[in-house]
Image: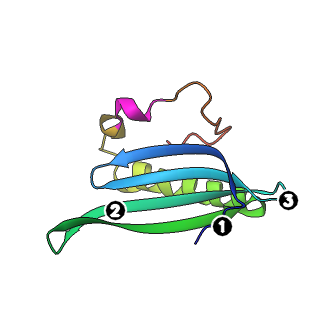
Amino acid sequence: MERDDQEMIYSKKIRAGKRTYFFDVRSTRSNDYYLTITESRRFQKDGDFVFEKSKLFVYKEDLDKVADALQDAVNHIKHELLPHIDFEQYRSVEETREPGDFDSGSYKWE
């Protein structure tokens, strides 16, 4: 459960069918920063739509290691397991960068 003392600094939402991903940068009262990655999945239960959420917290000391591992895993899938797939076909207009978006630096996710 999130506390009220966590300030939202940046948020990026990615819609993917019945799933939505949120990449949120937050700060604590002591001005420490961390990333939360949330997957929200919509499904039907007892005739109503409900949302199930899974959340991952990535702290500043782990950011580079997590980003490197994610990049390696994405590259492995794209280049080793599915080289015949054109992943650009899955991009949507919503995923294009907007002014003020976080600069991912050297992480290209390709």
The answer to whether marks 1 and 3 mark residues whose Cβ atoms lie closer than 8 Å is no
The magenta span reads 91-96
Q: Give me the residue at 62% from left, 28% from top.
A: 100
Magenta segment includes 109: no
**What amino acid does circle 1 point to?**
Arg
Residue at the limit of the structure toward the top, as seen here: 99
Query: Is 27 situated left or right of 92 in this image?
Result: right
Pointer 2: what residue?
Answer: 41
Residues at circles 2 and 1 in contact by the CB criterion of under 8 Å: no
What residue is at 54 percent from the left and 58 percent from the top?
A: 37
Q: Residue furthest right?
A: 30
- Quarter of the image where one finds residue 33: bottom right
> Which residue lies under the disc numbered 3?
30
Question: What residue appears at the point 34 percent right and 62 percent down from the top-left corner?
Answer: 41
Mark 1 sits on what residue?
3
Spatial separation of the CA atoms under disc 3 and disc 2: 32 Å
The residue type indicated by label 2 comes to Arg
Which quadrant does the N terminus fall into? Answer: bottom right
Residue at left offset 62%, top offset 65% = 57
User: Which is nearer the eye, 5 or 55?
Assistant: 5
Per the image, is 94 magenta? yes
Is 50 placed left or right of 29 in the picture? left
